[in-house]
Image (cartoon, rainbow, N blue to C red):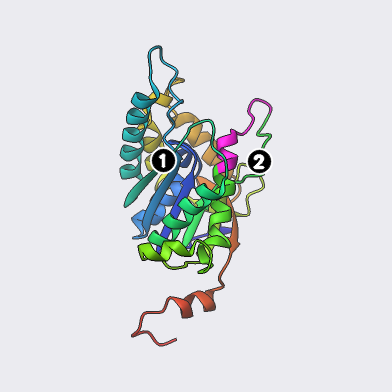
């Protein structure tokens, strides 16, 4: 299904700087251009992701967070949050789930975007990074049911954070997508956001590869470039409208 749906707000949750850019930056940029508030949450800062001689984890954190902030600006995100969990050792613990519930209840996104924790084998030349799987699992468990249950992590209420159940979850997929978002107008934002991660672009300019991937995803779908998702609707349209109607609106 091709979609022109635009949420009022969206939160993307991923493991590392550049994960969002590879997977869903075109969609987020499209939503941002249409007026949506966009939050990016990174579980780690990619602090083991620069293998240069003499590089320290502290310095790598500085570099990669700066790159991520520059990319977030290109995407049009209103904020970027770093949870600073250890890179390469991410685990979907209850503590990580609570951290993500805190962010969801604070930002109150209509949509949460994250990865698919079930993907292990990703083609003949890649095994999906364990951090990717851990971040996706923690994100899904935080989104549903945890964030919407007021008696779970109820201590967050002391921070003024009340339960919030997002409307939809967009899960990024590489194959077997069900919902396709046209990114013809934001493919360059996606490319430029990836270019902002200069420390990771050791194999050259990412533009040809990104355009090839996005064109292949869009093939046969009346769009030039696309990103693919599996979408779960947690609140139907009528329920969402009733729960989030403004006081002066008549339903």
> Which residue is found at the position 47% from the left and 80% from the top?
242
Residue identifier under label 2: 119
Q: Is residue 160 above or below residue 142?
A: below
Q: Residue at x 31, y 34 (%)?
A: 66
Taking 155 as reference, is 70 left or right?
A: left
Query: Which image quadrant: the N terminus?
Result: bottom right
Q: Earlier in the sequence, mark 2 or mark 1?
A: 2
Q: Find numbered disc 2 in the image and state the secondary structure of the residue it sits on.
A: loop
Give residue 190's mark: 1
User: Which segment did they paint magenta?
Assistant: 124-134
Q: Is residue 190 visible?
A: yes
Residue 54 position within the rendered picture, expressed as x and y whole percent measured from the top left: 38, 13
Q: Is residue 38 above or below residue 121?
A: below
Residue 133, image x, y percentages: 60, 41
Which residue does the image show at 51% across and 42% down from the upper left? 23
17 vs 201, nearest the viewer: 17
Q: Quadrant of residue 127?
A: top right
């Amino acid at each position: 299904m091709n979609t022109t749906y635009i949420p009022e707000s969206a939160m993307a949750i991923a493991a590392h700087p550049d994960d969002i850019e590879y997977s869903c930056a075109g969609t987020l940029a499209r939503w941002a251009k249409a007026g949506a508030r966009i939050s990016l949450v990174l579980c780690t800062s990619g602090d083991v992701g620069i293998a240069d001689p003499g590089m320290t984890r502290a310095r790598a954190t500085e570099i990669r967070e700066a790159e991520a902030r520059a990319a977030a600006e290109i995407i049009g995100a209103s904020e970027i949050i770093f949870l600073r969990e250890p890179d390469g050792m991410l685990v979907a613990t209850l503590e990580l789930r609570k951290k993500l519930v805190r962010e969801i209840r604070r930002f109150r996104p209509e949509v949460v975007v994250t990865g698919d924790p079930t993907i292990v084998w990703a083609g003949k030349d890649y095994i999906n990074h364990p951090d990717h799987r851990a971040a996706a699992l923690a994100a899904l468990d935080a989104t549903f049911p945890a964030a919407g249950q007021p008696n779970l992590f109820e201590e967050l209420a002391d921070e003024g954070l009340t339960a919030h159940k997002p409307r939809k979850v967009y899960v990024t997929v590489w194959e077997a997508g069900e919902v396709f978002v046209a990114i013809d107008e934001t493919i360059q934002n996606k490319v430029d956001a990836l270019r902002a991660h200069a420390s990771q672009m050791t194999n050259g300019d990412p533009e040809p590869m990104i355009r090839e991937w996005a064109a292949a995803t869009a093939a046969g779908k009346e769009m030039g470039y696309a990103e693919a998702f599996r979408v779960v609707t947690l609140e139907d349209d009528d329920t969402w409208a009733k729960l989030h109607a403004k006081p002066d609106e008549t339903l």
